[in-house]
Image (tube, rainbow, N blue to C red):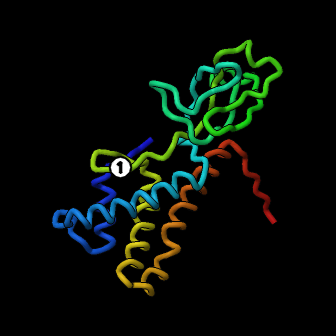
Amino acid sequence: MQTITYDAALSQFCDLAGLDPLTLSDIDKASINRLLNLWFKRGWEFYLWPQLIECGLRDANDGLIPYQQTGLHDIDTVVAIHEDNPSQNQNAREVQFRLLSIWIQIRDPQPAIRNQYWVTFRPPCPTLSNNSTLPAFLCAFTTHGAYTTWLRGEGQQGKAIAEAAEPWQWLYDEIDKIERQQSQNRRWRFRRN
């Protein structure tokens, strides 16, 4: 997955807003950071982006899998749970589960027999800061969304309304790309009239 540095995203925002990133005050940087994080999280959680989905072996105790395990990415959104690695075994049996506050409960007839499951999940949205990166496909949505919110904060309501659709168009364009990629093997038939 291609990534963009936080500094590059900040520069894109500043280009939109007509600001010089080198002369921003600490207060302005903190305010812009909050806006970028707000819109980044919206984009992250808007869709189950395949680029963000992970699959990993997780320990289970009495049919309970914690969302957090030492040394592993935390689990935010569970997509599926399998007995075997689904990327290596297409016949891996998927098990039913129920989400609890701090656990994922396996709803298997014999949960105590297995002590590990393959969990397909999306990790929580990371917080953007000076040393972080963000997925390139979410950068335009994040910067344009933060810009529209910044415009409202600056009292430029008319311009904010005019720009309001821009971030969402970037996001829907990314979803369209994914949907086309997922059906890339489909054959097209053309008829002459």
Residue drawn at point x = 35 percent, y = 46 percent? 133
**136 on left or right of 101:** left
Q: How many marks?
A: 1
- Answer above or below: position of 188 versus 25: above
Q: Residue furthest front?
A: 101
Residue drawn at point x = 70 percent, y = 25 percent? 82
Which amino acid does the dot numbered 1 rest on? Answer: Ile
Q: Residue furthest bottom?
A: 158
Q: Residue 16 sits in which quadrant?
A: bottom left
Closest to the observer, 158 or 189: 158
**15 on left or right of 125:** left
Residue 154, horizontal then vertical, whole percent: 35, 80
Please rate how many residues cluster around mark 1, counting C-alpha atoms within 10 Å: few if below 14, some from 14 to 19, many from 20. some
- Answer above or below: position of 57 versus 188: above
Task: Tell me the quadrant of the picture where the N terminus can be found.
Answer: top left
Residue drawn at point x = 44 percent, y = 85 percent? 157
Residue drawn at point x = 49 percent, y = 67 percent? 167
- Give the structural element (helix, strand or loop) at label 1: strand
Task: Tell me the quadrant of the picture where the C terminus can be found.
Answer: bottom right
Residue 65, horizontal then vertical, whole percent: 63, 27
Q: Name the residue under label 1.
A: 4
- Answer above or below: position of 84 versus 123: above
Q: Residue 146 sits in which quadrant?
A: bottom left
Residue 51, horizontal then vertical, whole percent: 53, 42
Q: Residue 105 sits in which quadrant?
A: top right
**182 on left or right of 132:** right
Residue 136, horizontal then vertical, whole percent: 42, 51
Q: Residue furthest left?
A: 23
- Answer above or below: position of 99 versus 149: above
